Image: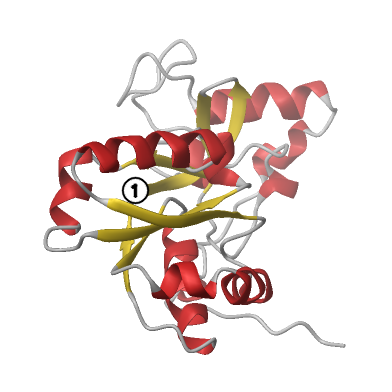
């Protein structure tokens, strides 16, 4: 999932300077899980903005802010409330904020769109309110060779062929509170009887797959 945090409230207020009426947008997926863009957070944001003299014309928590069909459907339903606003404040990821702007225009709604969150990384929910990065979306997955532990993400240096000389007692040289990713990989491969994979030399990754912007069209 995408891990998010709310922008500083002062920054949000500054983005809304000169605007009296605001429509709020959240997302039931990552933003709700991170407790920054669900029903409760929209209500809290509404109360805070109303204390600043803003009028909230309405709001919607989208099933998926990054899904064009969903955005267009909900925006058609909420069109009068959105048109009454000066702008939209989006409590969703960066992709969701861009989707909101683009799909609002596709249903003939042209409004300023303000992102209310910072998009941090793709990660795992380890327990309530705790998130850890697990994938760098590099486009060339090596998990099969590394016991499903990603060295690109979990090794601070992104090393592909074993630990650096600075790791010590299973801990990272850069951050001694953090487990060395290659120590974890070694133990996992040993556990599943695939330790021979440690001997394989992994070639340099094809980082051209990280060229941006990326797109994908699924074959039918």
On screen, residue 133 above or below 95: above
Which residue shows up at 49% across the image and 55% down it? 59
Is 66 placed left or right of 179 in the picture? right
Name the quadrant containing residue 23: bottom left
Residue closer to the observer: 111 or 27: 111
Crowding near pointer 1: few (<14 within 10 Å), some, many (20+)? Answer: some
Q: What residue appears at the point 60 percent right and 77 percent down from the top-left corner?
A: 76
Q: Quick one: SS at disc 1? A: strand
Q: Using the rendered image of the protein, determine whether residue 129 is visible from the camera's viewpoint.
A: yes
Find disc 1 in the rendering and name its residue.
118
Residue 16 x, y percent position in the rendering: 19, 57
- Residue drawn at x 56%, y 68% is 78
Residue placed most toward the observer, 166 or 107: 107
Q: Is residue 36 visible?
A: no
**Percent x, y for residue 142?**
65, 52
Residue under the image location 28 percent in, 69 percent down: 86
Residue 164 screen position, x and y as percent: 40, 33
Query: Does 193 sit left or right of 199 as displayed?
Result: right
């Amino acid at each position: 999932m995408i891990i998010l945090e709310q922008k500083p409230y002062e920054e949000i207020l500054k983005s809304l300077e000169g605007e009296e009426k605001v429509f709020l947008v959240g997302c039931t997926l990552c933003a709700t899980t991170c407790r920054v863009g669900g029903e409760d957070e929209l209500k809290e944001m509404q109360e805070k903005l109303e204390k600043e003299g803003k009028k909230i014309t309405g709001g919607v928590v989208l099933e998926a802010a990054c899904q064009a069909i969903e955005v267009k459907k909900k925006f058609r339903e909420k069109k009068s409330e959105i048109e009454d606003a000066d702008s939209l404040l989006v409590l969703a990821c960066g992709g969701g904020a861009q989707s909101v702007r683009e799909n609002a225009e596709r249903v003939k709604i042209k409004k300023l769109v303000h992102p209310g969150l910072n998009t941090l990384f793709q990660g795992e929910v380890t327990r309530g309110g705790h998130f850890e990065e697990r994938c760098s979306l590099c486009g060339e997955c090596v998990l099969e060779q590394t016991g499903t532990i990603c060295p690109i993400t979990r090794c601070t240096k992104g090393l592909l062929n074993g630990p650096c000389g600075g790791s010590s007692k299973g801990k990272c040289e850069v951050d001694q509170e953090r487990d060395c990713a290659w120590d974890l990989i070694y133990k996992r491969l040993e556990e599943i009887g695939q330790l021979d994979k440690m001997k394989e030399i992994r070639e340099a990754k094809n980082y051209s797959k990280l060229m941006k912007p990326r797109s994908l069209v699924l074959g039918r």
